[in-house]
Amino acid sequence: MTIKEMMEKTTVQQRVDEALEIAKNSQEKLNAVVTFIDPSEQIKNLEGKENGLLYGIPVALKDNVCTKGIKTTASSRILENYVPIYNAHIVDKLEDAGAVMIAKASMDELAMGGTNLTAATGPVHNPYDLDRISGGSSGGSAALVACGAVPLAIGSDTGDSIRKPASFCNVVGMKPTYGRISRYGIIPYASSLDHVGYFTRSVEDAAIALEVLAGRDDRDMTSSYREVPHYIDALSGDIQGKKIAILKNVTNAIDNQETLTVFNQLMDELKAKGAEVYEVELDENLLKAMLPTYYLIANCEATANHSNLDGIRFGVQKEGATAEEIMINSRTAGFGSLIRKRFVIGSYGLFVENQDRLFRQAQRVRRLIVEEVKKVLQDADVLVAPASANGAPRLDDQSADQLTDTYLIAENHMVLGNFTGYPSCTVPMGITKGLPIGINLTAKAFDEENLLNICYAIENITGLKDAKKEVK
Amino acid sequence: MEKKDAAYFKKLAHNLMFELNDQEAQELVEEFETLTKQLALLEAIDTTGVEEMIYPFEEETSFIREDVVSNVISQKEALANASKSKQGHFVVPKVVK
């Protein structure tokens, strides 16, 4: 059910009980939850919130969202015992709107991954095929929406950490404009790329969620002052004359013909609805440099951001004879292997002798890439491409050749939304080789109304509203 | 240029206040080979005269506020997540012997 249907057809107690039941019954197979939250106090506190847009709606939060008094681990061993003393801004927003939080969802450790294989509590499985990954880093959130437990789950997106799992799990994954939703109280990854977003099973629900979550917060220095529109009012489904630019570099780099067929059919349908659909090609060399640009910026920023995780002021502490030894032992035991290796690369990029050649070069190339996207979106309403070349990989298959165009461009192009800060959304598109696959759309900064409306038109065409896969 | 072998990466890790075991350091040597090829794609881009992009937007959203107290937490809250604390302080082994 969508949020609106839930409100019309069920009582608060019924929908919260059902959400918890589905999440708990699927936990053994999906492993999507780190911590279940007892909803009884929240339900008691709902009085006076009856007009809230999320009144009594069960919601899951990625486990990097700080929740006062509730364990928040970011799926890292070093934060296994961390209980925040404050709420993230969006937690207060959700509570004000009447939402009832039922679970903290698994994620790649510290959000640094795209598979959800690195969570301290183990991998999250894809509801559509339990032998496959959910995608990451917001994999637990995606799986909980996809299996029907909750209609809304919060995620965060630094490279494509909402939009890729959304594609793999057949749900809507929205990353609004940088600054649209406050990041206060979100355990960071890379501050110039981090966005808060969410998963839903319908575009209408995505519009409702954005209206609840968006808005200025003085505690996040990048939070925008712009007014928050009534996003739901923009959902007419009318796309007559809308300009839809296909990112040809991505379709060229995809060799899965089924994905291209599904995508091309959808483009034909959009044309039939009156949209102007055309191909654009960005500088290929810039796009091939996209992934190393991301990798450097993200890891350099992460290395600095996570220097505070030392086991002394908070987090799991290991024994040591000196303060230095305590920190070294805590960080060695507390971080997974992949995270420590990424920190080493980040530190390498920040060395005085490498900083201009690598980190600063990445920041300059970022500007060139952003200028390219900006040029396309001066004329177009949205830039579109398949969110991925293929459906979710198997849990034991991480063998992708990282130097091919398929990997460098087709599997990683959504980082454009993080470089630019532009709003970007993945919606279900169809099936490729028996697995769900999504389409990704990116619009101009703060043009979420237009973006969501085009997503809504796509949802009307595909009929993939409220798609879910029960797991028993 | 210093050789990028397992010992090199172990030293870097130690400077970051954690250790890599032999297997992790060796994996990093191998991953670094792929990364070096990817970084060559980045370094090949001509960025003469291009300014670094630090944040997505240059629109002003931060400001200098009046120096007034806000968002106060208690000492108890500040120490709530520390493994060891005493008399309002985080406790670590003695630095001065």
Image: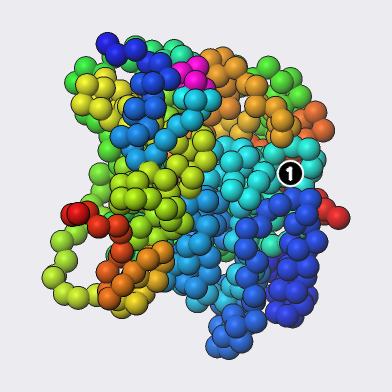
> Where does label 1 land, which residue?
A126
Residue A202 at least partly seen: no
- The answer to which image quadrant residue A311 occupies is bottom left
Give coordinates of residue A156: x percent, y percent. Answer: 50, 50
Total marks drawn?
A: 1
User: Magenta span has A386?
Assistant: no
Q: Nearer the viewer, residue B84 or A456?
A: B84
Residue A376 sits above or below residue B35 on the image = below
Q: Is residue B17 left or right of residue B25?
A: left
Chain hosting mark 1:
A
Check disc 1 and report its element: helix, strand or loop.
Answer: strand
Q: Nearer the viewer, residue B41 or A189?
A: A189
- Magenta-highlighted residues: B26-30
- Which residue is most to the right? A472
Q: Nearer the viewer, residue A323 or A440?
A: A323
If the image is split into quadrants, where does the C terminus of chain A sit?
bottom right
- The answer to which image quadrant residue A297 occupies is top left
Residue A93 sits above or below residue A252 on the image = below
Give coordinates of residue B83: x percent, y percent. Answer: 41, 64
At x 52% / y 50%, what residue is drawn? Answer: A76
Residue A37 sits above or below residue A104 on the image = below
At x 60% / y 83%, what residue is drawn? Answer: A41
At x 32% / y 32%, what residue is drawn? Answer: A347
Q: Nearer the viewer, residue A316 or A447?
A: A316
Q: Badge 1, how many Cα within 10 Å: few under 14, some, many 20+?
A: many
At x 42% / y 53%, what residue is drawn? Answer: A319
- Which residue is most to the front? B97
Which secondary structure class fits the magenta region best? helix
If the image is split into quadrants, where does the N terminus of chain A sit?
bottom right
Q: Amino acid under label 1?
A: Asn
Residue A330 at least partly seen: yes
Q: Is residue A105 left or right of residue A12?
A: left
